[in-house]
Amino acid sequence: MHANGLIWCGEGDVPMTWMDSVVNGKPVTPRSGYIVEICALWYNAVCFALDLAKDMEDNEFVKEFEDIPGLVKENFLPTFWCESRSHLADYVNDQGQNIFTRPNQLFACSLPYTPLEDEVINSVLRACSGELLTTRGLRTLAPKNPLFISRCEGDADQRHRAYHQGSVWPWLLGHYIDAQFRLHGRGFVDCARDLIGVFEEDMTEHGIGSIAELYDGNPPYRPHGCTSSALSVAEILRVMNLIDKYNTL
């Protein structure tokens, strides 16, 4: 952790996040420095731990960590906000902001504790809705980016190059829907139901009774990767429970 409360991580050729594909010993999606979802997860973890510590009257823990959320909140937006794109940078290092439009910024909007105000969350959601959202999940990179790969096909290296450079991952829908519920509450129930409802058709055509790991970045969104992905299935089930929860409010 740096003095600004943010986590700095990753150097060289070691992938540090879930975008961990490696080809010829090099990460396909190198990300280092202040990584947006790592810093968001850090903020969420510290806030959650502090609440637990206060409940348990762990005053030593509270004293050690109580200033960190304020530090993170003070520095998160100035570090990651990209005015030209009206969304958050994917990461920030010694070379400056990486302003590629990716879904990782959704973590800062969807987790129970967020360093962002609603206005910023709404702006991030607009960007992700316009460039990343599909009928099978969220793209890992906006199509207008010259590095975008629309099809996840070919040999192992070709597929690894596509995994996080445009391929659609269903599990990311969970974070997108969480963020929408944060802003709109029960008013987003019908939209959430529509977003996950399309998988009923997919469950009869590819992995019978299950959901694939990822899909092509452009229509017709052909399935790839694991035929039955725990990530995909778990998040769709979690969203179904969320819908039920908001329906009872």
Image (spheres, rainbow, N blue to C red):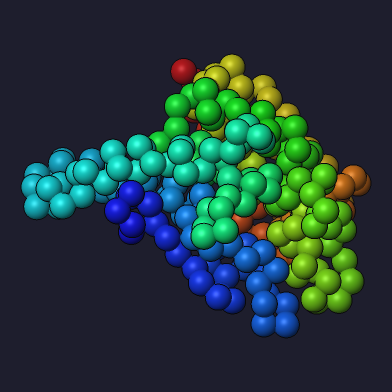
Classify residue 53 as left or right of residue 239: left
Tell which residue pokes out farthest to the front in this image. Answer: 95
Q: Nearer the viewer, residue 23 or 190?
A: 23
Do we see residue 239 in this rendering?
Answer: no
Q: Percent from the top left, x then y, of residue 58?
A: 10, 49
The vertical placement of 123 against 35, above or below, is: above
- Spot occupied by residue 201 in the image (x, y as percentages of width and height): 83, 42
Q: Number of labelled discs? A: 0
- Residue drawn at the location 80% of the way across and 76% of the way down: 156
Which corner quadrant of the image does residue 9 belong to? bottom left
Left or right: 78 in relation to 25: left
Work out whether 50 lies above or below 22: above
Above or below — where is 242 with respect to 200? above
Residue 157 lies in what quarter of the image? bottom right
221 horizontally vs 91: left or right = right
At a point 83% along the width and 71% down the height, the residue shown is 158
Percent across and percent down for residue 78 are: 46, 38
User: Can the viewer see residue 164 in this picture?
Assistant: yes
The N terminus: image quadrant:
bottom left
Q: Residue at x 53, y 67 (%)?
A: 16
State the residue in front, 155 or 199: 155
Where residue 178 appears, as percent x and y from the top left, is: 54, 34
Q: Residue at x 66, y 35 (%)?
A: 85
The residue sitting at the bottom extreme is 24
